[in-house]
Amino acid sequence: MEFHHAFSDFIQAESAYYVSSNICQPVTRPEQLSVAELLGARKTTFFVSYFWGQPFEQLVRALGLHATTYDSEDAPKSEFGYWVDCLSNNQWRVEEELGDGLTCASFYLALRSPSCQGFCLVLDEQATPLMRGWALLEVAQSFQRQEDSGTFQISLCSHQGVVGEGGCSGDERAVRKQWSEEAGVSLAYLLSDEFLTLAQERSHKEDPSFDELVEALVFGDLKVGQDSLCPRDNQPGCAFVDALDIMHQGKATHMLSWSWACPISQVRSALLWWMTEDEQDPNSVFLHMSAFVVNHYRFPSIYSHFEDIHISRWTADLLRIGSMVVLLDTWDTPEYLGSLRTVSELVTALGTGIPVRFIWPSTSQDELQQELQKGCASVLRVAESLGRFAVEKVLESHQQDGNCGRLRMIWRWPFEETDKNVRSLMLSMGGQLVGEALERKRQSEEAGISVAYLLSDEFLAMAKESTGKVDPKFYDMESGFFYGDRPIGKDMPCPRDGRPGCALVDALPARHRGVATHFLSWTWAYSVGQIRSALGAWIAQEGLEASEVFLYMCFFANNQYRILIEQSGAGSDNLEFIFEGNLRRIGSMVALLDTWNSPVYLTRVWTIFEQFMAIKLRIPVRIIMPSEAQRGLMEQIGRGNEGLNRLCDSLGTVDSEKAEASNPKDSAKVKHLIRNSVGSFKGVDAQVRAFMLDWVGKAVINHLDGIINTRKVSDSHKVTSL
């Protein structure tokens, strides 16, 4: 106390780190002694454990309150000697103070000295000493000393008061209450044989679930904490965490979210895996576990009948702790992600920005690794399982719960963001193999074919060779590309499902593909010449670089081995989702009409559907035509009303109900979607017709602008020549 008083102007709110470096060392430098030796050492009465980072003034105040508490006629506080390492250790001979081993260290000798009557643990507001290795070692040794002697006193104190065995002041009671409410169970204890033995003995089961364990601890024949005063209300019956030895409890560092239905072995396995994986110090991790920190003598059914007040309390605890560990029972469709209680906790943590760490038992990790070693297809199946969470599915399975508090916890946050975050956490548990496989899958699904490749001699030669025709249609190329002697990509694993047989865009050299920049609406009835002519004219008119334009073109982008060869559901079963997803992502459509005069484009149900979807999603559409068809269009415009009427009659004829598809199932599915989306074929026809006629109008305007601009240039040349 005298030391602090002498240097109080310098110390103020500084920590022991500051005091040691800026006061203790300067004043002891000449004699190379400790502060205690310099001022006149006395025998140790109490050993002090504390955190060097807390204000030194709080340490002094706490020891003053401690001295007052233990002051008596037989042992006046004026004779007390407190062993405080920053003052008692010789800072000039630190290695000597540490000694050659535990029993030679200065702290051990002081704690074990015959004059030492007790141990004083000074806590700050965060109970930091219980998260520091040295302090925990000192706590453990003090318990050992108490066990050896039986009379050794152990006290908890802070700058607000001392936690004693008997009655305590309001400040002291507040400290005890706060400590209890913020306490967590040591990871080291949960992994210990002591905890396992207690769980087995109290539940009378080899591997009880936490439901069974809590039932045994609160209602069994060997209750825990029933007769102990609860620090929160000073009434008999305390939480399990309060009944534990002080060395097994500390300020919670993580909120644990898990299912009470999990057996003890599963939880311990997951915690051990986490400790090993993240190199956690089990003595520095304290878990807020509802089974242990809730006082079940007050609220035995708190988590089965979760009122708003308890939700608010849980949320406040989560925000205070600031970290959540989610314990999944398995990697493949975990029950945790289907339970309303656990999902509501996870959603709240993610929504409030709390860091979340997923863990699972080591057996699950082993099973996952075995699956990942089975090949590409298995890796993608794992990825599908890990990434299938959808919060709406959880809500659908709990419709009978009405408007309960747990549902409101979930409804509070956007579903799409929740799904994205949960899936990301799950997929990250799959490791690098899953991440790489998903990236390849994404690149494949978003890929387009290069316009430069479509205009190349390489592609033209391949088309001719596979069909034996000079200007084959894409229907003709189907056989040579996918059914012939050398089917392209047949033996290559598909990045989308890992099975043999991939899309053309994946089989071609990487230089011919890239992220799709435009969605091409067209039909396989077109010839290679028509496609090349229309694309070449478009690229030239727009001033685009062919090597930088990539088309989502179904012939190349879809996996035809699934659609044509296997005739799987990958064709039209998910049509609305596939088209809408691609159109939204790409954001630009190019519609290729074969001609202006009764175009095949307006007789195919696929292309009508694509045009309708673009209108519905308000995606810009650029109509292009082969050069010959474009010239014919201009000729009709040049004929005035007669030509315009012919154009409007031809391009305004849309009949989606009679439109066809090469696959009858596709036709039926598209027409079903049209009926559900608009209610009638006439509605779709009207929208597509209006778009086509609007395009004719714009073509006329562009044509007239061209004539006028040409006349202006001609007139300017005449003026110049004059």
Image (cartoon, rainbow, N blue to C red):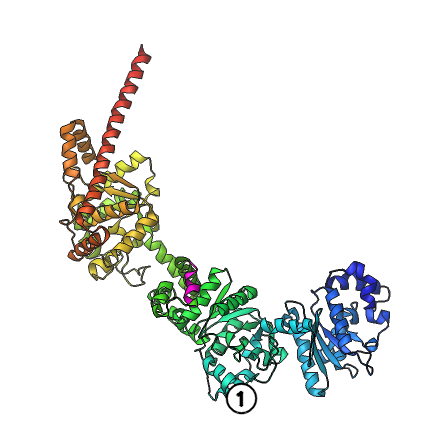
In the drawing, does residue 469 fall left or right of residue 146? left
SS majority, magenta: helix
Please give the range of residues in magenta. 406-413
Q: Quadrant of the C terminus?
A: top left
Vertical comparison of 452 with 201: above or below: above
Which residue bears the numbered disc 1?
222
Is residue 34 visible to us here?
Answer: no
Amino acid on which the number 1 mark rests in the picture? Leu
Figure quadrant of the N terminus: bottom right
Q: Is residue 610 left or right of residue 410?
A: left
50 w.r.t. 695: above or below: below
Quadrant in the rendering for residue 532: top left
Image location (x, y in percent) of residue 40: 86, 72
* Residue 268 drawn above or below residue 486: below
Query: In the rendering, at what x and y percent does residue 295 appear?
Result: 54, 77
Which is more toward the observer, 367 or 241? 241
* Residue 203 at least partly seen: yes
Q: Is residue 224 magenta?
A: no
- The answer to whether 488 appears left or right of 285 in the picture is left
Q: Nearer the viewer, residue 153 or 441?
A: 153
Between 549 and 289, the one nearer to me in the picture: 289
Local packing at callout 1 (Cα closer than 10 Å; few below 14, some 14-19, many 20+) is few
Count of number-bearing discs:
1
